[in-house]
Image (cartoon, rainbow, N blue to C red):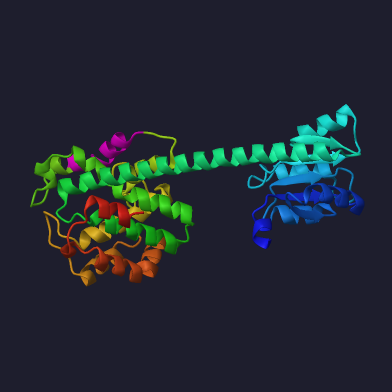
Amino acid sequence: MKSSLMNRQTILMVDDTPENIDVLSEILSDEYRVKVANNGEKALKIVYSDDPPDLILLDIMMPDLSGHEICRRLKANPDRRGIPVIFVTAMSTVEDEQLGLSIGAVDYITKPISPPIVRARVRTHLALYDQTRELERMVEQRTAELITTRQQIIRRLGRAAEFKDNETGNHVVRMAHYARLIAEAFGLGPEATAVIFHTAPMHDVGKIGIPDSILLKAGKLDAGEWKLMQQHPLMGAEIIGKHDNDLLTTARTIVLIHHERWDGNGYPQRLRGEDIPLEGRIVAIADVFDALISVRSYKPAYPLEQALKIMEEEDGRQFDPALMAAFRKAFPEIKRIMEIYADDKGVLTDLELLGVLK
């Protein structure tokens, strides 16, 4: 019996007159789960709880908070504004009804109430609310699918750049995790951290436009080659383009400015200090650290101790000091990522890459 009751839709009845609550309960309790509140504060507490009602029957004339004020507060809350409100009141003029509907009520029942009308109105608006929630669920699902698709495109483009110039194909996996850990240690929230995590692999996508003779050169680049290499952030930003989407906007920012330096001597825009967007400052640390400990065509992998020494020397020069503090704080986890995705364990396949970057 309890299980079947819990599966019923819930109606919240708000009225300061017990007799009115009793009448409505008698009409609806056989078909619905009923909650009651005899004032506005109790009603809002129920609405904002973890078990909100599916519909509210609301009196207007009550002490403290009126029904109108309760409805206004409810409709101002993005998480609860969809709950249908039906005013049940003795205020029966056309102006009263217009006011109730204008502040967000879906219907208006006047007293004395008719049981068949109450049942019909409640049933209708619960059905409409169910349909609305199902449509919202479908939209959210579709939106999530689109976000996942964008994330996969971003990762695949980042992967394409890695395969072009890097023998150690797990670089994008490691540095994305490093960036995530630094962001978390710095105090960024889950949403901002996730965006950085999913877009960091795109940082070098502009290298797709750099000739292999430069990317894979074993020795030092000459002045002309270095000038061309410095164009890859601009090329990457052009590849991504400008978008309203947060993921692609952040990806473009990272691509464009991850070679800027805290002291203003980076490229391509020679930005300095906090003029460099935070995402780029985070990714710069993650990218450089992994490059130091990895084999490149122009250098061997540095021992960890030497790599950390170089990172410390660049604190306040190439890197944001506050983010370097976050790097140190996150280092035990960063070291674990180094071991899990070490190059000697083989390059991750595309499916494995998608799995670890979820």
Q: Is residue 254 left or right of residue 110?
A: left
Q: Nearer the viewer, residue 320 or 64?
A: 64
Q: Is residue 254 left or right of residue 103?
A: left
Residue 73 coordinates in the image, percent (x, y): 74, 45
Q: Is residue 131 above or below residue 286?
A: above
> What's the residue at 64%, 54% (across, down)?
7
Looking at the image, the residue that sits furthest to the top is: 94
> What's the residue at 73%, 49% (across, down)?
31
State whether residue 244 appears in this view: yes
> What's the residue at 41%, 42% (across, down)?
145
Q: Quadrant of the C terminus?
A: bottom left
Q: Nearer the viewer, residue 334 or 268?
A: 334
| Count of picture labels | 0
Residue 36 coordinates in the image, percent (x, y): 80, 54
Q: Is residue 279 above or below residue 129?
A: below
Q: Which residues are magenta?
A: 227-241
Q: Is residue 245 left or right of residue 26?
A: left
State whether residue 262 appears in this view: no
Q: Is residue 113 left or right of residue 205?
A: right
- Majority secondary structure of the magenta segment? helix
Looking at the image, the residue that sits furthest to the front is: 1
**Is 233 a magenta residue?**
yes
Residue 159 coordinates in the image, percent (x, y): 24, 47
Q: Nearer the viewer, residue 281 or 250?
A: 250
Dividing the picture into quadrants, the one containing residue 320 is bottom left
Q: Quadrant of the N terminus?
A: bottom right
**Is 35 a magenta residue?**
no
Q: Is residue 44 above or below residue 67?
A: below
Residue 311 coordinates in the image, percent (x, y): 28, 64
Q: Nearer the viewer, residue 169 or 11?
A: 11
